[in-house]
Amino acid sequence: MPALDTNVLVRYLVQDDPAQLAAAKRLISRCVAEGWTLFVPVTVVLELEWVLRSSFLFGKDDVLLTLSSLFSAAELTFESERALEVALQLFRKGPADFADCLHVALAMQAGEQPLWTFDKGAAKVSGAQLLAKA
């Protein structure tokens, strides 16, 4: 199963580089025509969220919509898909950023809780706990 890197997904989503967009569309179309599902590593999703937010100034609602759409795309398979879905739900209803929500969701998936943190925002996520400074 072929896998996608962050930059291919970014080009496909934001369509800011016509040549790279065309190449991404050709690749995805060819894989779909062959009946292949494209694999997306969890680290690519984490980087994708960061790039969309920091480089393309996507707000939280836009990130939520974009990631939700990707997760429901039949052409894509995601590493740790259940943890990604949990992270998206935690992100949707809480003050923590997506990365913190994903860290908590992956720890939950592994059966390892709580996720100890010094980050006060992350500690507000169910499954995380603030580590007090001495």
Image (spheres, rainbow, N blue to C red):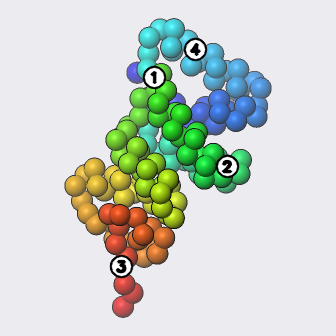
Q: Position of residue 87 (x, y in %)?
A: 42, 51
For marks 1 and 3, the one nearer the N-term is 1
Q: Residue at x 51, y 15 (%)?
A: 31
The residue labelled by disc 2 is 58
Question: Image quarter for residue 5?
Answer: top right
Element type where label 4 sits in the image: helix
Element type where label 2 sits in the image: loop
Question: Marks 2 and 4, Cα distance to the nearest angstrom?
Answer: 26 Å
Q: Neighbour class for label 4 at 10 Å: few (<14), some, many (≥20)?
A: some
Q: Residue at x 36, y 58 (%)?
A: 104
Q: Residue at x 51, y 38 (%)?
A: 68
Element type where label 3 sits in the image: loop
For marks 1 and 4, the one nearer the N-term is 4
Question: Image quarter for residue 123?
Answer: bottom left
Residue type indicated by callout 2: Phe
Q: Position of residue 43 (x, y in %)?
A: 46, 45
User: Which quadrant: the N terminus?
Assistant: top left
Residue type indicated by callout 1: Ala
Answer yes or no: do the residues labelled 2 and 1 have beta carbons within 8 Å? no
Specify whether residue 31 is in view. Answer: yes
Question: Image quarter for residue 74?
Answer: top left
Q: Neighbour class for label 2 at 10 Å: few (<14), some, many (≥20)?
A: some
The residue labelled by disc 3 is 131
The residue labelled by disc 1 is 74
